[in-house]
């Protein structure tokens, strides 16, 4: 049986490291950091870790809102394609920093892309 992306990427330690580095990048990214004003980043990081674990085929413990509901308040703040692209770019840069092979990064991006319309409320 072939390994899941979650296993190939390095499992829980890799997802945890990626989320921590990712949010450091996001909070320093002037294109998108305003969307995280007044956000409890510890809770946000925990939700993101659970979501990515599920999305990458790992143990399913994500109990958060669906993408459309969870991002609706951000769409009202002007969230658009350029912001979605910035998030994907920051995630890709995080994975490069963690020496994740490009083919796995491509898989991660391929998992993110189909969520675009839901995240942007379309």
Image (cartoon, grey):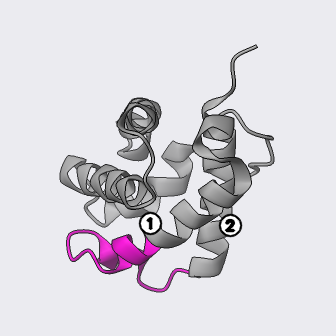
Segment tinted magenta in the rendering:
23-39
Would you say the residues marked 2 and 1 are in contact, meaning their CB atoms lie under 8 Å apart?
A: no
Query: Does residue 79 appear left or right of residue 66 in this picture?
Result: left
Q: Is residue 25 magenta?
A: yes
Which residue extends farthest top? 1
Q: Is residue 64 visible?
A: no
Depth check, front residue: 92 or 38: 92
User: Which of labels 2 and 1 is toward the front?
Assistant: 1
Give the secondary structure at mark 1. helix
Q: Is residue 37 magenta?
A: yes
**How many residues crowd mark 1 within 10 Å: few (<14), some (14–19), many (20+)?**
many
Which residue extends farthest bottom? 38
At 64% from the left and 63% from the top, the residue drawn is 16
At 21% from the left and 77% from the top, the residue drawn is 30
Q: Which residue is mark 2?
A: 46
Q: Which residue is mark 1?
A: 22
**Picture coordinates of residue 23, whole percent (x, y):** 45, 71
Q: Is residue 13 visible?
A: yes
**What label does residue 116 carry, if any?**
none
Looking at the image, residue 79 lies above or below residue 2:
below
Q: Quadrant of residue 56?
A: top right
**How many residues crowd mark 2 within 10 Å: few (<14), some (14–19), many (20+)?**
some
**Picture coordinates of residue 69, whole percent (x, y):** 54, 49
Query: Does residue 1 appear left or right of residue 114 in this picture?
Result: right
At 79% from the left and 41% from the top, the residue drawn is 60
Q: Quadrant of residue 93?
A: bottom left
């Amino acid at each position: 049986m072939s390994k899941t992306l979650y296993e190939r990427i390095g499992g829980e330690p890799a997802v945890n490291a990626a989320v921590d580095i990712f949010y450091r990048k996001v909070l320093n990214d002037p294109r998108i950091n305003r969307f995280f004003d007044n956000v409890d980043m510890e809770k946000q990081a925990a939700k993101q870790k659970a979501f990515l674990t599920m999305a990458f085929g790992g143990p399913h413990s994500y109990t958060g809102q669906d993408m459309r509901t969870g991002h609706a308040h951000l769409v009202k703040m002007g969230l658009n394609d350029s912001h979605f692209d910035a998030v994907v770019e920051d995630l890709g840069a995080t994975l490069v920093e963690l020496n994740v092979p490009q083919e796995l990064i491509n898989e991660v991006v391929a998992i993110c892309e189909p969520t675009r319309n839901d995240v942007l409320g379309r």
